Amino acid sequence: LRHFLTTEGVDPRLLGRILDTAESFAGVLGKSVKTVPLLRGRTVVNLFFESSTRTRTTFELAAKRLSADVLNIAVDTTTTKGESLLDMLRNLQAMQADMFVVRHHQSGAAEYFARHVDPGVAVLNAGDGWHAHPTQAMLDAFTIRRHKGAFEPLRIAIVGDIRHSRVARSQIHAFNALGAGEVRVIAPDTLLPADIDSLGAQVYNDLNAGLRDADVVIALRLQRERMQGALLPGESEYFRHYGLTESRLRGAHPEAIVMHPGPINRGVEIDSALADGPRSVILDQVTNGIAVRMAVMTMVLGVQPDTPREAS
Ligand code: CP
Protein backbone atom coordinates (compact mmCIF):
# COMPACT_ATOMS: atom_id res chain seq x y z
CA LEU A 1 0.00 0.00 0.00
CA ARG A 2 1.77 3.14 -1.23
CA HIS A 3 -1.03 5.69 -0.66
CA PHE A 4 -4.64 5.19 0.48
CA LEU A 5 -6.86 7.27 -1.78
CA THR A 6 -9.95 5.16 -2.41
CA THR A 7 -11.52 1.80 -1.63
CA GLU A 8 -12.56 1.37 -5.27
CA GLY A 9 -10.68 -1.41 -7.03
CA VAL A 10 -8.47 -2.19 -4.03
CA ASP A 11 -7.54 -5.86 -3.59
CA PRO A 12 -10.01 -7.30 -1.02
CA ARG A 13 -7.10 -9.07 0.70
CA LEU A 14 -5.48 -5.71 1.32
CA LEU A 15 -8.71 -4.33 2.81
CA GLY A 16 -8.89 -7.43 4.99
CA ARG A 17 -5.33 -6.84 6.13
CA ILE A 18 -6.19 -3.26 7.13
CA LEU A 19 -8.97 -4.68 9.32
CA ASP A 20 -6.69 -7.35 10.82
CA THR A 21 -3.94 -4.83 11.54
CA ALA A 22 -6.46 -2.47 13.12
CA GLU A 23 -7.66 -5.36 15.26
CA SER A 24 -4.16 -5.89 16.57
CA PHE A 25 -3.83 -2.20 17.47
CA ALA A 26 -7.24 -2.17 19.13
CA GLY A 27 -6.12 -5.17 21.17
CA VAL A 28 -2.80 -3.66 22.26
CA LEU A 29 -3.82 -0.09 23.00
CA GLY A 30 -6.02 0.56 25.95
CA LYS A 31 -5.96 2.11 29.36
CA SER A 32 -2.47 0.93 30.28
CA VAL A 33 -0.59 1.05 26.94
CA LYS A 34 -1.02 4.41 25.20
CA THR A 35 1.66 4.43 22.52
CA VAL A 36 3.79 2.16 20.38
CA PRO A 37 7.06 3.33 18.77
CA LEU A 38 6.35 2.24 15.19
CA LEU A 39 6.43 5.75 13.65
CA ARG A 40 8.98 7.35 16.00
CA GLY A 41 10.99 9.94 14.08
CA ARG A 42 8.37 10.17 11.30
CA THR A 43 6.41 13.33 10.56
CA VAL A 44 2.70 13.32 9.69
CA VAL A 45 1.17 16.49 8.23
CA ASN A 46 -2.58 16.98 8.56
CA LEU A 47 -3.71 19.22 5.70
CA PHE A 48 -7.39 19.98 6.13
CA PHE A 49 -8.93 22.40 3.64
CA GLU A 50 -12.43 21.57 4.96
CA SER A 51 -13.73 21.39 8.50
CA SER A 52 -13.59 18.11 10.38
CA THR A 53 -14.10 16.97 13.95
CA ARG A 54 -13.76 13.18 13.90
CA THR A 55 -11.39 12.53 11.02
CA ARG A 56 -8.76 15.15 11.84
CA THR A 57 -8.61 14.39 15.53
CA THR A 58 -8.54 10.61 15.16
CA PHE A 59 -5.80 10.87 12.53
CA GLU A 60 -3.87 13.05 14.98
CA LEU A 61 -4.47 10.64 17.85
CA ALA A 62 -3.53 7.67 15.68
CA ALA A 63 -0.25 9.33 14.67
CA LYS A 64 0.55 10.22 18.27
CA ARG A 65 -0.18 6.70 19.45
CA LEU A 66 2.33 5.53 16.86
CA SER A 67 4.83 8.06 18.33
CA ALA A 68 4.98 10.20 15.15
CA ASP A 69 5.44 13.97 15.16
CA VAL A 70 2.25 15.66 13.95
CA LEU A 71 1.83 19.00 12.20
CA ASN A 72 -1.63 20.48 11.82
CA ILE A 73 -1.48 23.07 9.06
CA ALA A 74 -3.77 26.10 9.15
CA VAL A 75 -4.41 25.88 5.42
CA ASP A 76 -6.43 29.08 5.12
CA THR A 77 -3.68 31.35 6.40
CA THR A 78 -1.24 29.81 3.96
CA THR A 79 -3.41 29.87 0.86
CA THR A 80 -4.60 33.46 1.36
CA LYS A 81 -1.02 34.60 0.77
CA GLY A 82 -1.32 33.33 -2.78
CA GLU A 83 0.84 30.25 -2.46
CA SER A 84 -0.07 27.42 -4.83
CA LEU A 85 -0.89 23.95 -3.52
CA LEU A 86 2.20 22.59 -5.16
CA ASP A 87 4.48 25.17 -3.53
CA MET A 88 2.90 24.46 -0.16
CA LEU A 89 3.51 20.76 -0.70
CA ARG A 90 7.15 21.32 -1.70
CA ASN A 91 7.77 23.44 1.40
CA LEU A 92 6.24 20.87 3.70
CA GLN A 93 8.26 18.13 2.06
CA ALA A 94 11.37 20.24 2.65
CA MET A 95 10.59 19.82 6.37
CA GLN A 96 10.93 16.08 5.76
CA ALA A 97 7.28 15.16 6.03
CA ASP A 98 6.70 11.43 5.63
CA MET A 99 2.94 11.48 5.20
CA PHE A 100 0.20 13.90 4.21
CA VAL A 101 -3.36 13.40 5.42
CA VAL A 102 -5.48 15.47 3.04
CA ARG A 103 -9.08 16.63 3.20
CA HIS A 104 -10.27 18.88 0.40
CA HIS A 105 -13.59 20.01 -1.04
CA GLN A 106 -12.52 19.04 -4.58
CA SER A 107 -12.76 15.45 -5.80
CA GLY A 108 -9.32 14.24 -6.86
CA ALA A 109 -7.35 16.54 -4.52
CA ALA A 110 -5.69 13.71 -2.60
CA GLU A 111 -4.76 11.98 -5.86
CA TYR A 112 -3.21 15.25 -7.08
CA PHE A 113 -1.05 15.37 -3.97
CA ALA A 114 -0.12 11.71 -4.40
CA ARG A 115 1.05 12.39 -7.96
CA HIS A 116 3.35 15.18 -6.81
CA VAL A 117 4.91 13.93 -3.57
CA ASP A 118 8.46 12.62 -3.50
CA PRO A 119 9.05 8.87 -3.56
CA GLY A 120 8.59 7.40 -0.09
CA VAL A 121 6.11 10.08 1.01
CA ALA A 122 2.58 8.74 1.50
CA VAL A 123 -0.77 10.46 0.99
CA LEU A 124 -3.93 9.44 2.82
CA ASN A 125 -7.28 10.70 1.58
CA ALA A 126 -9.30 12.09 4.50
CA GLY A 127 -12.23 12.96 2.21
CA ASP A 128 -12.20 14.63 -1.23
CA GLY A 129 -15.33 16.30 -2.55
CA TRP A 130 -18.05 13.82 -3.46
CA HIS A 131 -15.47 11.20 -4.40
CA ALA A 132 -14.05 9.12 -1.54
CA HIS A 133 -13.46 8.84 2.20
CA PRO A 134 -11.65 5.51 2.37
CA THR A 135 -10.60 5.44 6.04
CA GLN A 136 -14.20 6.23 7.06
CA ALA A 137 -15.40 3.25 5.02
CA MET A 138 -12.76 1.03 6.61
CA LEU A 139 -13.59 2.08 10.17
CA ASP A 140 -17.23 1.38 9.33
CA ALA A 141 -16.27 -2.05 7.99
CA PHE A 142 -14.20 -2.66 11.12
CA THR A 143 -17.15 -1.71 13.33
CA ILE A 144 -19.48 -4.00 11.38
CA ARG A 145 -17.05 -6.92 11.59
CA ARG A 146 -16.64 -6.44 15.34
CA HIS A 147 -20.39 -6.46 15.91
CA LYS A 148 -21.53 -8.92 13.25
CA GLY A 149 -18.58 -11.14 12.31
CA ALA A 150 -18.41 -12.30 8.68
CA PHE A 151 -19.68 -10.02 5.91
CA GLU A 152 -21.13 -12.74 3.68
CA PRO A 153 -24.59 -13.08 5.26
CA LEU A 154 -25.08 -9.36 5.88
CA ARG A 155 -27.62 -7.03 4.31
CA ILE A 156 -26.26 -3.51 4.72
CA ALA A 157 -28.61 -0.57 4.08
CA ILE A 158 -27.28 2.97 3.56
CA VAL A 159 -30.01 5.59 3.94
CA GLY A 160 -29.99 9.22 2.88
CA ASP A 161 -28.06 11.61 0.70
CA ILE A 162 -26.11 9.12 -1.40
CA ARG A 163 -25.67 11.61 -4.24
CA HIS A 164 -23.31 13.97 -2.41
CA SER A 165 -21.72 11.38 -0.14
CA ARG A 166 -18.09 10.37 -0.52
CA VAL A 167 -18.70 8.11 2.49
CA ALA A 168 -21.43 6.12 0.72
CA ARG A 169 -19.26 5.59 -2.38
CA SER A 170 -16.34 4.32 -0.33
CA GLN A 171 -18.61 2.14 1.80
CA ILE A 172 -20.27 0.51 -1.22
CA HIS A 173 -16.89 -0.38 -2.76
CA ALA A 174 -15.42 -1.60 0.55
CA PHE A 175 -18.43 -3.64 1.69
CA ASN A 176 -18.75 -5.36 -1.69
CA ALA A 177 -15.03 -6.11 -1.81
CA LEU A 178 -15.20 -7.58 1.69
CA GLY A 179 -17.99 -9.90 0.54
CA ALA A 180 -21.17 -8.36 1.97
CA GLY A 181 -24.29 -10.36 1.05
CA GLU A 182 -26.15 -7.27 -0.16
CA VAL A 183 -25.48 -3.54 -0.12
CA ARG A 184 -28.60 -1.39 -0.43
CA VAL A 185 -29.02 2.35 -0.84
CA ILE A 186 -32.28 4.02 0.19
CA ALA A 187 -33.01 7.54 -1.06
CA PRO A 188 -35.31 9.57 -3.29
CA ASP A 189 -34.14 9.75 -6.92
CA THR A 190 -33.02 13.36 -6.35
CA LEU A 191 -30.48 12.16 -3.77
CA LEU A 192 -29.02 9.34 -5.88
CA PRO A 193 -25.92 9.87 -8.07
CA ALA A 194 -26.18 9.56 -11.85
CA ASP A 195 -23.90 6.50 -11.85
CA ILE A 196 -25.78 4.63 -9.12
CA ASP A 197 -26.51 1.65 -11.41
CA SER A 198 -22.80 0.95 -11.80
CA LEU A 199 -21.83 1.24 -8.13
CA GLY A 200 -22.93 -2.22 -7.03
CA ALA A 201 -25.85 -1.43 -4.72
CA GLN A 202 -29.54 -2.36 -4.76
CA VAL A 203 -31.60 0.83 -5.01
CA TYR A 204 -34.71 1.49 -2.95
CA ASN A 205 -36.81 4.64 -2.96
CA ASP A 206 -39.06 3.32 -0.20
CA LEU A 207 -37.54 3.33 3.29
CA ASN A 208 -39.62 0.48 4.73
CA ALA A 209 -38.88 -1.79 1.76
CA GLY A 210 -35.16 -1.01 1.92
CA LEU A 211 -34.91 -1.65 5.66
CA ARG A 212 -36.63 -5.03 5.53
CA ASP A 213 -34.43 -7.66 7.26
CA ALA A 214 -31.37 -5.37 7.13
CA ASP A 215 -28.58 -6.36 9.54
CA VAL A 216 -26.79 -3.01 9.41
CA VAL A 217 -28.48 0.36 8.87
CA ILE A 218 -26.30 3.37 8.12
CA ALA A 219 -27.80 6.88 8.17
CA LEU A 220 -26.19 9.72 6.22
CA ARG A 221 -26.80 13.40 6.75
CA LEU A 222 -28.16 15.76 4.09
CA GLN A 223 -25.01 17.42 2.78
CA ARG A 224 -26.50 20.86 2.33
CA GLU A 225 -23.15 22.47 1.59
CA ARG A 226 -23.06 20.49 -1.67
CA MET A 227 -26.70 21.04 -2.72
CA GLN A 228 -28.31 23.64 -4.88
CA GLY A 229 -31.86 25.06 -4.53
CA ALA A 230 -34.10 22.53 -6.23
CA LEU A 231 -32.39 19.53 -4.67
CA LEU A 232 -32.64 20.83 -1.14
CA PRO A 233 -35.45 18.97 0.63
CA GLY A 234 -37.31 20.47 3.61
CA GLU A 235 -36.06 18.93 6.86
CA SER A 236 -39.44 17.90 8.28
CA GLU A 237 -40.61 16.45 4.96
CA TYR A 238 -37.32 14.56 4.63
CA PHE A 239 -37.65 13.17 8.16
CA ARG A 240 -41.22 12.06 7.42
CA HIS A 241 -40.10 9.97 4.45
CA TYR A 242 -36.49 8.99 5.22
CA GLY A 243 -35.82 9.74 8.88
CA LEU A 244 -34.76 6.70 10.91
CA THR A 245 -36.84 6.02 14.00
CA GLU A 246 -37.23 3.09 16.37
CA SER A 247 -40.60 2.21 14.86
CA ARG A 248 -39.21 2.20 11.29
CA LEU A 249 -36.36 -0.04 12.43
CA ARG A 250 -38.91 -2.69 13.40
CA GLY A 251 -38.82 -3.94 9.81
CA ALA A 252 -35.07 -4.54 10.01
CA HIS A 253 -33.47 -7.62 11.56
CA PRO A 254 -34.22 -7.67 15.31
CA GLU A 255 -30.49 -7.43 16.06
CA ALA A 256 -29.71 -4.78 13.44
CA ILE A 257 -27.10 -2.21 14.40
CA VAL A 258 -27.45 1.50 13.60
CA MET A 259 -24.51 3.52 12.30
CA HIS A 260 -23.77 7.08 11.21
CA PRO A 261 -20.41 8.54 10.12
CA GLY A 262 -21.25 11.86 11.79
CA PRO A 263 -21.90 14.65 12.20
CA ILE A 264 -25.50 13.67 12.95
CA ASN A 265 -28.45 16.00 12.50
CA ARG A 266 -30.96 14.86 15.09
CA GLY A 267 -34.56 14.92 13.92
CA VAL A 268 -33.51 15.22 10.26
CA GLU A 269 -31.99 11.87 9.21
CA ILE A 270 -32.18 10.11 12.59
CA ASP A 271 -34.27 10.34 15.73
CA SER A 272 -32.41 10.96 19.00
CA ALA A 273 -33.94 7.88 20.66
CA LEU A 274 -32.36 5.71 17.96
CA ALA A 275 -29.03 7.57 17.79
CA ASP A 276 -28.60 7.23 21.57
CA GLY A 277 -30.33 3.85 21.93
CA PRO A 278 -29.00 0.31 22.45
CA ARG A 279 -28.74 -0.51 18.74
CA SER A 280 -26.55 2.50 18.04
CA VAL A 281 -22.81 1.89 17.50
CA ILE A 282 -22.15 5.47 16.38
CA LEU A 283 -19.60 6.24 19.09
CA ASP A 284 -17.90 2.86 18.54
CA GLN A 285 -17.28 4.02 14.99
CA VAL A 286 -15.43 7.07 16.31
CA THR A 287 -13.29 4.99 18.69
CA ASN A 288 -12.54 2.43 15.98
CA GLY A 289 -11.32 5.23 13.70
CA ILE A 290 -8.14 5.47 15.77
CA ALA A 291 -7.11 1.82 15.32
CA VAL A 292 -8.06 1.77 11.63
CA ARG A 293 -6.08 4.96 10.92
CA MET A 294 -3.11 3.55 12.83
CA ALA A 295 -3.28 0.48 10.62
CA VAL A 296 -3.34 2.46 7.39
CA MET A 297 -0.54 4.78 8.56
CA THR A 298 1.81 1.91 9.38
CA MET A 299 0.96 0.03 6.20
CA VAL A 300 1.66 2.95 3.84
CA LEU A 301 5.03 3.54 5.49
CA GLY A 302 5.81 -0.17 5.43
CA VAL A 303 6.93 -0.18 9.04
CA GLN A 304 4.93 -3.10 10.31
CA PRO A 305 7.25 -6.10 10.44
CA ASP A 306 4.69 -8.50 9.00
CA THR A 307 3.16 -6.05 6.52
CA PRO A 308 5.03 -6.18 3.20
CA ARG A 309 5.02 -3.20 0.86
CA GLU A 310 2.58 -3.37 -2.04
CA ALA A 311 1.77 -1.20 -5.01
CA SER A 312 -1.48 0.77 -4.54
N1 CP B 1 -17.20 11.34 9.41
C1 CP B 1 -16.48 12.46 9.20
O1 CP B 1 -15.78 12.58 8.19
O2 CP B 1 -16.60 13.41 10.17
P1 CP B 1 -15.76 14.75 10.24
O3 CP B 1 -16.24 15.65 9.12
O4 CP B 1 -16.03 15.33 11.60
O5 CP B 1 -14.33 14.41 10.03
Image (cartoon, helix red, strand yellow):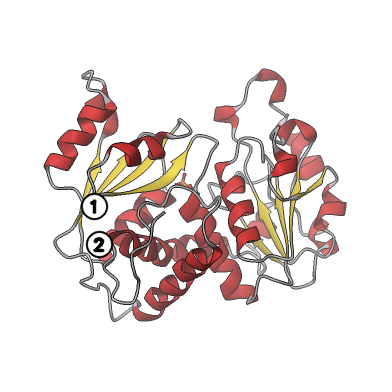
Quadrant (top left/top right/bottom left/bottom right) for the C terminus:
bottom left
In this rendering, the answer to whether 88 lies above or below 252 is above
Of badges 2 and 1, nearer the viewer stands 1
Q: Nearer the viewer, residue 102 or 60?
A: 102
Image point (64%, 52%), residue name: 172
Could you tell whether 167 is left or right of 70 in the image?
A: right
In this rendering, the answer to whether 31 lies above or below 299 is below
10 Å neighbourhood of mark 2: few (<14), some, or many (≥20)?
Answer: many
Q: Earlier in the sequence, mark 2 or mark 1?
A: 2
Could you tell whether 98 is left or right of 176 in the image?
A: left
Q: Percent from the top left, x then y, of residue 102?
A: 36, 42
Q: Percent from the top left, x then y, of residue 39?
A: 22, 64
Image point (23%, 48%), residue name: 119
Q: Percent from the top left, x then y, of residue 75?
A: 28, 32
Instruction: Find disc 1 in the rendering and name its residue.
Output: 120
Mark 2 vs mark 1, CA separation in Å:
20 Å
Q: Quadrant of residue 258?
A: bottom right
Quadrant (top left/top right/bottom left/bottom right) for the N terminus:
bottom left
Image point (59%, 35%), residue name: 223
Q: Percent from the top left, x then y, of residue 107?
A: 48, 33
10 Å neighbourhood of mark 1: few (<14), some, or many (≥20)?
Answer: some
Residue 48 at least partly seen? no
Q: Nearer the viewer, residue 114 or 27?
A: 114
Give the residue type at disc 2: Lys
Q: Nearer the viewer, residue 236 or 213?
A: 213
Instruction: Find disc 2 in the rendering and name its residue.
Output: 64
Residue 144 at least partly seen? yes
Give the residue type at disc 1: Gly
